[in-house]
């Protein structure tokens, strides 16, 4: 998340409107402490994030690791013709 905050700052200063994930489910929180509720929340957040991708002019992938969710989001963005940039280009699954 700290890399995302830094990327948000740099993109904002560059004059871009930043829309990013609103929560980090990898960090403990009471809103997703119940496993059943957490899974339902993840489904809703995945759909919300796809909606954010649809609104975006481009997608910036932050960090040096690409998990399954991020890989799916990259694929989704590219299927919509959205440019995808990486803070760590070596992790681009399309390369």
Image (cartoon, helix red, strand yellow):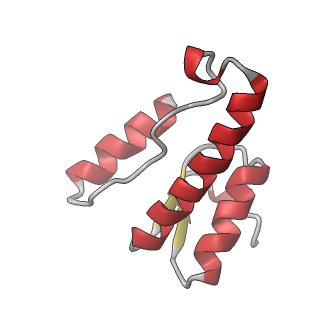
Residue sitting at x 41%, y 44%: 7
**At which x and y percent is residue 18?**
33, 54
Front in this rendered view, residue 32 or 74: 32
**At which x and y percent is residue 93?**
77, 65
Q: Is 1 situated left or right of 93 in this image?
A: left
Image quarter where the C terminus lies is: bottom right
Relative to residue 75, is residue 27 depicted above or below? above
Front in this rendered view, residue 88 or 47: 47
Q: Is 23 situated left or right of 42 in this image?
A: left
**At which x and y percent is residue 2?**
48, 29
**At which x and y percent is residue 25?**
62, 30
Front in this rendered view, residue 72 or 40: 40
Residue sitting at x 55%, y 48%: 62
Residue sitting at x 45%, y 61%: 52
Q: In which quarter of the view is residue 78 placed?
A: bottom right
Residue sitting at x 65%, y 72%: 76
Q: Is any part of residue 94 visible from this angle?
A: yes
Q: Is any part of residue 86 visible from this angle?
A: no
């Amino acid at each position: 998340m700290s890399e995302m905050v830094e990327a948000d700052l740099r993109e904002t200063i560059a004059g871009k409107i930043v829309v990013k994930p609103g929560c980090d489910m990898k960090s403990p929180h009471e809103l997703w402490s119940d496993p059943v509720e957490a899974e339902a929340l993840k489904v809703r957040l995945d759909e919300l994030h796809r909606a954010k991708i649809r609104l975006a002019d481009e997608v910036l992938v932050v960090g040096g690791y690409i998990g399954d969710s991020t890989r799916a989001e990259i694929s989704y963005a590219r299927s919509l013709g959205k440019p995808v940039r990486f803070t760590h280009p070596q992790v681009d699954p399309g390369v």
